[in-house]
Amino acid sequence: MLNKNLLIAISTSIIISAIVAHVLSQQANYLNTTYTLLVDYVVYFSVFSGLYYLDNRKKYLLESSQIDKSKLKHDLIKLITSLGIAEVVYTIARWFLQYYFLTINYDAYLASIISQTISMIICLIVINLSVKMTRLYKDGN
């Protein structure tokens, strides 16, 4: 489910980021890149958080309908650690790739799509390795 949620969030942010990059195509390359990356993060985390919550809201309920705060806290720490490492890699790769593509005169929307796609592939590899290392889904949930 994690990869499904990631792919939906990525797809949504690719589309919206490309639109923003195109709208801001007259801006300086570093501004276009920075603003597009900010929009990318807002869209990505909003969509991913919503989907992750919908998929996992019952996982943390006890029979008494109370939230298992210990289990939730434990899993959130693992998830944030796994995503945090990958997001640092993603941010660096995304910014420099988009800036590079803009400087060699790619259309802004195309620079955004290509840089985001390459960066997300790298990010997904790091996330999957991190999730395995932190054993986030060791119980099969």
Image (cartoon, grey):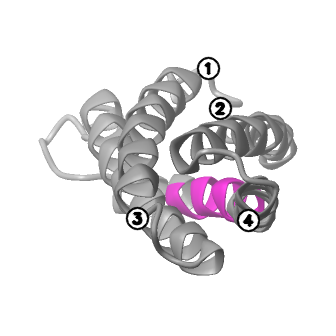
User: How far across and down, in percent of the image, does residue 132 sit?
Assistant: 82, 36
Relative depth, front residue between 50 and 33: 33
Q: Is residue 112 above or below residue 124?
A: below
Measured from the top left, where is residue 110 in percent x and y?
60, 38
Total residue callouts: 4
Q: Earlier in the sequence, mark 4 or mark 1?
A: 4
**Callout 4, which amino acid?**
Tyr
Q: Residue at x 63, y 72 (%)?
A: 29
Indicate yes or no whether the magenta region holds residue 35.
no
Q: Amino acid at mark 3?
A: Leu
Judged by its main secondary structure, the magenta piece is helix
Residue annotated with mark 1: 140
Mark 3 or 1: in front is: 3
Q: Which residue appears at 67% of the width and 64% of the height?
A: 84
Circle nearer the viewer, 4 or 1: 4
Q: What's under tag 1, amino acid-wise? A: Gly
Residue 84, magenta (yes or no): yes
The crowding category of the residue bearing disc 3, from other C-alpha atoms within 10 Å (few below 14, some 14 to 19, many at least 20), is some
Marks 2,4: beta carbons within 8 A? no
Q: Amino acid at mark 2?
A: Tyr
Res. 99 mark: 4
Cα separation, mark 4 vs mark 1, equals: 40 Å
Q: Using a 10 Å C-alpha cutoff, classify the residue at mark 4 as few (fewer than 14 neighbours), some (14 to 19) or many (20 or more).
A: many
Magenta region: 76-86
Query: How many C-alpha atoms fall within 10 Å of the one at disc 1: few (<14), some, or many (≥20)?
Result: few
**Upstream in sequence: badge 3 or badge 4:** 3
Residue 42 drawn at (x, y percent): 36, 62
Q: Which residue is disc 3 drawn over?
A: 24
